[in-house]
Each structure stands twice: as structure tokens, then as C-alpha cells.
């Protein structure tokens, strides 16, 4: 080029930077000044600082900093952010904080760089102070902020702060990217909340993109990887978690070689779908071929016993068979037994069992018993268990919700008010219900009473139509579960537009006629939506699969695979 300007130089530098040639950027910067005699602007300087930080050129970075101070370019926000980022990457927190504090003007990028640098070097108290300052100035967060703050909560093991941040992001965004979701899982895991970590993991929408999985399966077959056991195991797991247990079974049947994981994934997959008989059949086949069951196998087996109501068999596997094969029972096995006894209505026995086992029970085990109290309508027993659970963990949102439901069903509105007041005092916030459905590679997300979707008017009309058409089939709105002391008609309105109903309605509007409807929800499916979905499946002659926080529900011809217990 006979003539070159700042745009020419900056474009070339940015190109080198983006392709990983950071040292070339510094050479170009020197040539721009010495050969063409051009003075850099704020955009050029920002690229140069990024190059210095990428290739670790501390001396050159400080020289450039001196140049921008003399030229007054350090007051540009681009330059300031690049400087903070550079010093953070040099692990020079003093330099980063000096720029952050002395140069006026802050935006989300400035805060993100400082927070990330402090977190990486373990200055947790200082990071909390910067976060307080950011909150005080009302700076709008982006996904990078959330990832960093969740990381801070994990390092501090501050579950209360983590819950507040999780609640904040759920209020503002219906969909979270994989980086934020991973940070949430990490935060709950580091804070010892394994159940919440598992729930966040199960809610990942990569986990529900069945069409992408089908495409991947085709590629695996074409490339000849189907004989690899690890690939077959991953496919079974993928199909089971995406709600297509039939496809998982086909992959399992076609496998030439199987290992213990293959059997476990199939047994647990069937159990998760409520198909206890099928799970037990696979278990017996596993024993017949001489494959030794392990810890995970018995989690699936005991879960299957729970679905089938096989109390004697479940206790036999726990107390005798597991010892025979050398498997030491753990918390997951004991929790399955609690579920087994609870489903059979043996609530007193379930409580005695929980108090007698040799391992320390977590909240999940006790909450399993609490859920059973609600199903069996033993509200007095349920209140006592709930109070005990809240003594164990005063921050367990699920227990507050279940206790509220128990009070509402007993029409104890004073109790509902008491629970809400307690939650406010303890700053406990219920996670909003979110459901999503994938139609032709696009994921559509719904929350209760949602008006955000571009087709919300048509969706509301469809829900209204479906509810009207299933009333002659026996649908009676379950107003007893509404946590508001209002008129019956208003209670029906509260129930009508739950997120799963809207997702199902949208699926019926747009899914291919021959395809089943597959909906995913982050919380437990409510009783009214469950009853309505059974009748909708009968009305439309459609198979509807709903995966909630507890399990898969397969609705067909007015029945559900859970046998109305979940």
C-alpha cells in the first residue's frame, strides 16, 4: 500500500492478535511509529496492551503504559480496560488496582478484569469489596461477571451469596450459556450442595438436544465407532437423558461388547423413566451373563424396586445381596429404601429407618420422606418432618416449598403466611419454574404466565382450548395446591398457565404430527399439570414425555409411567 493510515495498521495488528501472533503486533506497532510516523489512537493502544498480556511482555507493557499516560490516552475506557486486563494477567494486582482506582470511569469490563484477577490470585476479601462497589454503582452484569462471581462464591464456600446470585440471574435470563451453568454446578459442588449441583447439571439444555444426538449417532455409525464400548455407553446415556429410552434400549441391544457401565446405564435409565420391570429384567440378564454388579448397579435396582413397590425384595438386596457381592451400602442406597418405604405408605418405618442407618443422612433423604407425606396426605407427620429438616438446613428451598404446599392443602393459610415470612426473614428465594421444548433444532423456553414468547397470544389460546376440552374427560383443577387464599376461579387462573402447560401447548402447535412431545422442567411437576397432561395425552392421542427435577414422566392414553407417584 503506498499510503497507510491508523485503520490499516490497526486492522493488521488485530488480525495478528486474533490468530495468536502477539509478538508480530509489537513489531508492527514500532514500525507504525518509526516508519510511517503515525501516532496511535485508543483502539491501537488497546490491541497493543492485549498483545503484551498474551505474550507476557511485562517490560514492553509498562513502557506502553508510560506512553499512554504522557499522551493522555489512558482516560479512554477501551485503554483503561485493556490496561487492567494486562496487569491482571501479569499477576500485578497492585498495578491493576492502581489503574482501576486512579483513572475515572468504570464499566462492566473493568470490574470483570479486576474481579477475575483478584479471584485468580486468592484475594477473596478484596474481590468481595470490589463486588460490593460494583453493586453500589448499579453496573449491569454480563455472563462473564456471573461466571466470576459464582467462582468467588465457590472459593468462599458462601452458599447464601451463591443462592442470591443464582436467583438474580434466573430473574433476568431464561436461558443460561454453558459457561454460566458450569460455574453454577461448580459453586454448588464446592458448597457441599450436591443435590443442587446435580439439578443444575440435569437442567443443561445440551442434555436435551435430541436431534443433535441423532446426527451424532449417524456420524458414529458412518465412522465405524459402534464397536467401541465407551461410545455405546455414551449413546445409551445420551438417549436415556434426552427422554428416548426406546432408542437407548436399541443401542444397548445392538452392542456386541458390554461392560459393567453398559449394564448400569441401561438399568438406571429404565429406573429414571419409571420402568421398573424393564430395569429388573436387565439386572437379571446382567447376573445371568456373569457380570458382577457394583455400587451404581444397586442404586438403579433399588430405585426400580421403589417404582414397583417391591418392599421385601428391596430390603433383601440391601441387607443380603449387596453383602454377598461385596458392595458396601451408601447414602444413595439408603435414600432409595426411604423412597421404597414411603411409596408403600410405610411412613413410620421410613422415619425409623432413616434414624437407624450407619451413615449421616442428607436433606435429600429426609425430603424424600417429606414428599411422601404430601402424596399420602399425612399433613401432621409432614409438618413434623419438615421442621426437623429445616433445623438440619435452614436454607433448603425445597423443604419450604413442600411445607407451604402441605399447609395450603390443609387450608392452613396462617401456616402458608408463616412460611413466606420465614423465607423473607432468611432471604430464601424460590427458584422460578422454567420449562423448555426443542422444535426443529430451536429451544423454546417458558416460565409461568409467560408473555415473552413471540407467539404468546396463540399459546395462551391453545392452553385455554386444551383445558376446556379435557374437562369433559374428568379434569378438575387442583386448586388445593394453590398457595393463595383467593376465590376458586382465581385459583384456576393461577394453575392454567404453568410453564409445562405452555411448553406442551407449543409442542402440539408446531411439533411434527408423528413425533412425541418432549418437555424439560427445572422443578418438580405440580399435581395439576400432571393430571392435565395425562388427559391431554388421551385427547390428542400423543405421547408426551416430561422430565422434571425428580424423574421422567411418559404420558400415553391418559396414563403416566410414574403411576401418579413422584
Image (cartoon, rainbow, N blue to C red):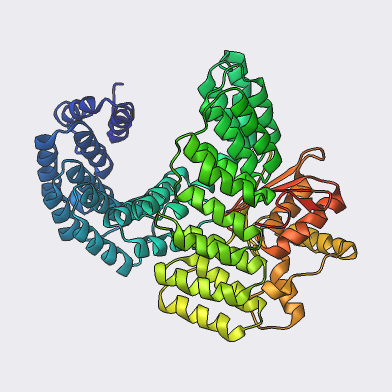
Q: Quadrant of residue 133?
A: bottom left
- Closest to the observer: 194 or 23? 194
Answer yes or no: is residue 248 visible.
Answer: no
> Along the horizontal axis of the image, is 401 left or right of 155?
right
Q: Where does the C terminus fall, quadrant-wise?
A: bottom right
Q: Is residue 484 above or below residue 25?
A: below
> Along the horizontal axis of the image, is 422 left or right of 435?
left
- Closest to the observer: 330 or 265? 330
The residue at the far bottom in this view is 414
Rendered location of residue 116, percent (x, y) = 26, 49
Residue visible at 9% across and 39% down in the picture: 63
> Along the horizontal axis of the image, is 76 left or right of 532?
left
The residue at the far top in this view is 224
Q: Is residue 200 above or below residue 243?
A: below
> Along the horizontal axis of the image, is 488 left or right of 233?
right
Q: How many marks?
A: 0
Residue visible at 57% across and 15% down in the picture: 227
Q: Is residue 513 above or below residue 234?
A: below
The residue at the far right in this view is 472
Residue visible at 67% across and 43% down in the picture: 276
Q: Is residue 209 above or below residue 174?
A: above
Rendered location of residue 140, percent (x, y) = 39, 60
Q: Quadrant of residue 137?
A: bottom left
Residue visible at 57% across and 72% down in the picture: 382
Rendered location of residue 229, percent (x, y) = 53, 21
Answer yes or no: is residue 381 visible.
Answer: yes
Q: Where does the N terminus fall, quadrant-wise?
A: top left
- Closest to the observer: 464 or 81? 464
Amino acid at each position: 500500500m503506498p499510503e497507510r493510515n491508523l485503520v490499516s495498521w490497526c486492522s493488521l495488528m488485530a488480525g495478528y492478535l486474533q490468530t495468536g501472533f502477539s509478538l508480530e503486533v509489537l513489531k508492527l506497532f514500532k514500525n507504525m511509529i518509526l516508519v510511517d510516523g503515525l501516532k496511535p489512537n485508543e483502539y491501537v493502544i488497546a490491541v497493543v496492551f492485549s498483545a503484551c498480556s498474551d505474550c507476557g511482555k511485562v517490560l514492553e507493557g509498562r513502557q506502553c503504559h508510560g506512553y499512554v499516560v504522557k499522551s493522555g490516552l489512558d482516560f479512554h475506557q477501551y485503554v483503561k480496560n485493556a490496561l487492567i486486563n494486562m496487569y491482571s494477567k501479569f499477576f500485578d494486582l497492585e498495578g491493576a488496582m492502581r489503574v482501576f482506582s486512579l483513572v475515572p470511569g468504570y464499566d462492566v469490563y473493568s470490574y470483570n478484569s479486576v474481579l477475575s484477577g483478584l479471584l485468580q490470585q486468592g484475594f477473596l476479601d478484596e474481590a468481595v469489596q470490589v463486588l460490593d462497589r460494583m453493586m453500589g454503582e448499579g453496573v449491569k452484569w454480563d455472563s462473564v461477571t456471573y461466571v466470576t462471581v459464582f467462582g468467588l462464591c465457590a472459593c468462599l464456600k458462601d452458599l447464601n451469596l451463591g443462592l442470591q446470585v443464582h436467583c438474580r440471574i434466573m430473574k433476568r435470563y431464561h436461558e443460561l450459556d454453558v459457561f454460566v451453568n458450569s460455574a453454577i454446578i461448580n459453586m454448588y459442588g464446592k458448597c457441599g450442595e450436591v443435590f443442587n449441583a446435580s439439578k443444575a447439571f440435569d437442567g443443561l439444555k445440551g442434555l436435551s438436544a435430541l436431534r443433535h444426538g441423532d446426527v451424532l449417532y449417524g456420524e458414529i455409525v458412518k465412522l465405524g465407532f459402534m464397536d467401541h464400548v465407551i461410545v455405546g455407553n455414551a449413546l445409551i446415556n445420551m438417549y436415556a437423558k434426552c427422554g428416548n429410552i426406546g432408542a437407548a434400549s436399541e443401542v444397548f441391544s445392538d452392542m456386541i461388547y458390554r461392560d459393567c457401565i453398559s449394564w448400569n446405564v441401561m438399568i438406571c435409565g429404565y429406573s429414571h423413566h419409571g420402568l421398573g420391570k424393564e430395569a429388573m429384567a436387565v439386572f437379571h440378564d446382567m447376573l445371568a451373563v456373569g457380570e458382577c454388579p457394583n455400587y451404581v448397579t444397586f442404586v438403579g435396582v433399588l430405585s426400580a424396586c421403589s417404582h414397583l413397590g417391591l418392599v421385601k425384595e428391596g430390603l433383601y438386596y440391601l441387607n443380603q445381596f449387596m453383602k454377598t457381592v461385596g458392595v458396601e451400602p451408601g447414602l444413595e442406597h439408603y435414600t432409595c429404601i426411604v423412597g421404597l418405604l414411603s411409596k408403600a405408605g410405610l411412613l413410620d418405618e421410613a422415619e425409623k429407618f432413616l434414624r437407624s442407618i450407619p451413615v449421616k443422612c442428607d436433606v435429600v433423604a429426609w425430603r424424600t420422606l417429606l414428599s411422601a407425606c404430601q402424596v399420602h396426605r399425612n399433613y401432621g407427620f409432614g409438618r413434623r418432618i419438615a421442621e426437623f429438616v429445616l433445623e438440619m438446613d435452614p436454607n433448603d428451598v425445597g423443604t419450604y416449598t413442600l411445607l407451604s404446599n402441605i399447609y395450603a392443602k390443609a387450608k392452613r393459610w396462617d401456616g402458608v403466611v408463616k412460611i413466606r415470612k420465614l423465607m423473607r426473614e432468611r432471604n430464601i428465594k424460590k427458584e422460578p419454574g422454567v420449562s423448555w421444548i426443542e422444535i426443529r433444532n430451536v429451544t423454546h423456553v417458558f416460565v409461568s404466565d409467560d408473555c415473552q414468547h413471540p407467539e404468546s397470544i396463540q399459546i395462551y389460546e391453545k392452553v385455554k382450548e386444551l383445558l376446556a376440552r379435557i374437562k369433559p374427560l374428568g379434569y378438575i383443577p387442583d386448586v388445593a395446591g394453590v398457595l393463595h387464599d383467593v376465590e376458586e376461579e382465581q385459583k384456576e387462573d393461577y394453575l392454567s398457565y404453568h410453564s409445562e402447560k405452555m411448553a406442551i401447548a407449543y409442542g402440539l402447535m408446531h411439533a411434527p404430527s408423528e413425533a412425541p412431545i418432549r418437555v424439560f422442567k427445572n422443578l418438580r411437576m405440580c399435581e395439576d399439570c400432571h393430571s392435565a397432561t395425562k388427559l391431554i395425552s388421551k385427547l390428542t392421542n400423543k405421547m408426551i414425555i416430561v422430565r422434571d427435577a425428580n424423574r421422567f414422566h411418559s404420558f400415553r392414553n391418559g396414563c403416566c409411567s410414574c403411576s401418579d407417584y413422584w
